[in-house]
Image (tube, coloured by chain):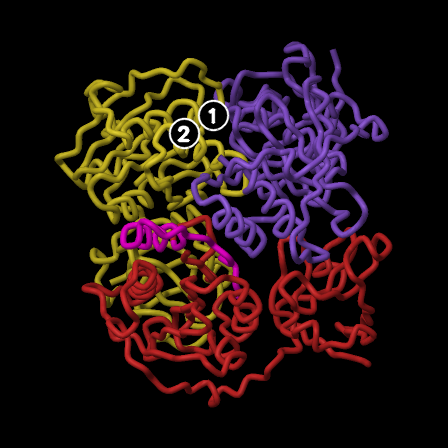
Chain colours: A purple, B yellow, C red
């Protein structure tokens, strides 16, 4: 299975072109778009989102991950190998949290080059062909060399006390693992103090709360309304924990 | 074929995770997203939309239907069997109109339980595995028991004189079957009185009209403009018929 | 491979129904959505977008192209055959630029008719069944007859000095082939004068520039921001070249 984690949008034309490349080079592999609306051009919140959602997929999954504002600059192109899954994408911090959460991670720098490489769309021209080859069975060593992990230079925290994603319903995911936040704690967003609940139907209509979402992140929601609008939240909004 | 009718949005991550579950459990079944923007958390307008569009698919189709604001509460999980198609989803009224339009419908309560069930995403954890198993040939009786139809308690009308969906062009679908509205009748939306036409090119640029859409619903449109903006329509806007 | 180029949107229900038709009639053909957000009901800018992106696909590709404000009127339904690819859709100018760029193009008028044809959704009822049959191997001559190219009557230019598409990041594509614009030239959009750059990372944060995008169009962007918002650009905005 090839899973897409990008900020390309779905409607056109980037996801379609990437899908066409994958389809031609790995026709047997099902292609699934997990996120096409990862935080646009922002590797830091995207890294926490990817760490929460990528690990849900089984061993053998190939994850093509492109949030790449530095496309065309000198940043490395890498493969991350962890628990039988492989992640392919730019080395701009996007994989920092995935790597940190598993000490057995191995990092590779992609040496393979396409015949023609556009300056602005490495997702299609470089990362997709590599992902397709891996999905079709090419060993990593034929495409990449082991390389050093430089994520320490960025020094991002283990959990990010910010909003990292607003979903289709207006719910606001934080970059914090929910099991690390005491259930009795309140989350403070702007001037709002939010208690936890198990799920939407456990609180009255219109009430804001936080809960541990289905992939383990602490998430802020309002029963029957959009939390982003009701509480003024956006990607990057700081969140505090009050015990 | 597995057809998705949800309010999940496509961009991420809900449709992707559901698709991954379906793909793993029923790898032979093509998966098609019919609606990912059904009226958000509103089973009533969604029920009329589903009745109009679900019946277009051939016998053998499995429809995974999730508009589920009560997820995590006590509402039943059901399978509806009608004319060789099966619908899977929450028993919150979403299937009321599908059932009413065919007296031969059979209703089942899902007894199958996943090993782990999140509080907020039964679409992925419960409904998708059931849908995949049905698509892969598991008999309904192995997953569910016949149960009583409780839709009468909701008492929703046969046709809903409201806007139930705004499409990508801004056209506004009503919950009324177009063949039940006399072609000479006018539809009244807010203060606007609309005559019928066959299609867009039959009226002057900028003119509002109603017509019977390609799935049989009475729909309000404006040639060359967005009807929702031009006429101030949204899901839930009341529509009257004037003969 | 069947490629979709439409203004249907993805979320529902038009792309889903078209996909279901294709899937049933050509189950072996992978289906890829290239654009579902082509300029809505505007064949002219869509024609330049299609010419830039359609030719990227290999011989044998079937492109189902529907931007069709005149659906239900007398416009012809056609097949365009060029360099081993076939395009299917309405004869409203959508294929004018594709045809002009290859003198070997052949044009066919579709004679095949479905049993039932809705007045407003020929994409599903007419174009998709024809595209699926072509993808499954039916010769063009069984579905269509050679016909005369009437594109000269529209007289559209070879390159369109307007914005033809705003992408997911807010970048603004022009209808001009980038290799025909001197790299030293400036593009003038409203009161903004823009120099060229190779890619985003070559200019300072916040700076607007133009570049040749990954499919050969001259495109206007801002490093780290949305060009459409920053420069006030929309589909149809005129662009001038200043040498």
Quarter of the image where one finds residue C238: bottom right
Q: Quadrant of the C terminus of chain A?
A: top right
Q: Nearer the viewer, residue C165 or A98?
A: A98
Q: Residue at x 26, y 19 (%)?
A: B143
Q: Nearer the viewer, mark 1 or mark 2?
A: 2
Question: Which residue is at 26% across, 55% downward?
Answer: B216
In this view, which residue lies farthest toward the left? Answer: B104
Q: Nearer the viewer, residue B87 or A208?
A: B87
Residue indicated by mark 1 = B121
The magenta segment: C14-39
Q: Residue A13: percent from the left, percent from the top?
A: 56, 56
Which residue position holds label 2? B24
Q: Is residue C28 left or right of residue C40?
A: left
Marks 1 and 2, Cα distance to the nearest angstrom? 18 Å
The quadrant where residue B172 appears: bottom left
Question: Which mark sits nearer the N-terminus, 1 or 2?
Answer: 2
Which residue is pictured at 56% across the width and 34% down the height?
A: A62
Residue A140, x across and y down, in percent: 62, 34
Which residue: 69% across, 12% down?
A: A185
Element type at marker 1?
Answer: loop
Marker count (numbered): 2
Q: Residue C6 colored magenta? A: no
Taking the image as drawn, is residue B213 in sight? Answer: no
Q: Which mark is residue A178?
A: none
């Amino acid at each position: 299975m090839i899973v897409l984690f990008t900020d390309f949008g779905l409607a056109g034309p980037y996801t379609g072109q990437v899908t066409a490349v994958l389809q031609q080079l790995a026709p047997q592999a099902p292609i699934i778009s997990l996120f096409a609306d990862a935080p646009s051009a922002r590797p830091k919140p995207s890294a926490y989102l990817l760490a929460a959602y990528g690990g849900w997929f089984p061993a053998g999954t190939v994850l093509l991950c492109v949030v790449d504002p530095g496309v065309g600059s000198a940043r490395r192109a890498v493969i991350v190998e962890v628990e039988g899954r492989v992640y392919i994408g730019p080395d701009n911090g996007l994989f920092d949290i995935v790597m940190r959460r598993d000490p057995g991670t191995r990092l590779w720098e992609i040496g393979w080059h396409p015949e023609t490489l556009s300056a602005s769309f490495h997702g299609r021209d470089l990362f997709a062909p590599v992902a397709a080859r891996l999905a079709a069975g090419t060993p990593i060593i034929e495409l990449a060399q082991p390389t050093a992990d430089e994520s320490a230079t960025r020094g991002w925290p283990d959990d990010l006390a910010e909003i990292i994603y607003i979903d289709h319903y207006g719910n606001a995911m934080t970059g914090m693992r929910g099991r690390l936040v005491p259930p009795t704690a309140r989350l403070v967003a702007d001037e709002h103090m939010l208690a936890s609940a198990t799920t939407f139907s456990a609180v009255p209509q219109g009430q804001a709360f936080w809960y541990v979402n289905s992939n383990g992140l602490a998430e802020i929601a309002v029963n029957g309304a959009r939390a982003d609008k009701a509480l003024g939240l956006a990607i990057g909004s700081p969140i505090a924990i009050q015990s």
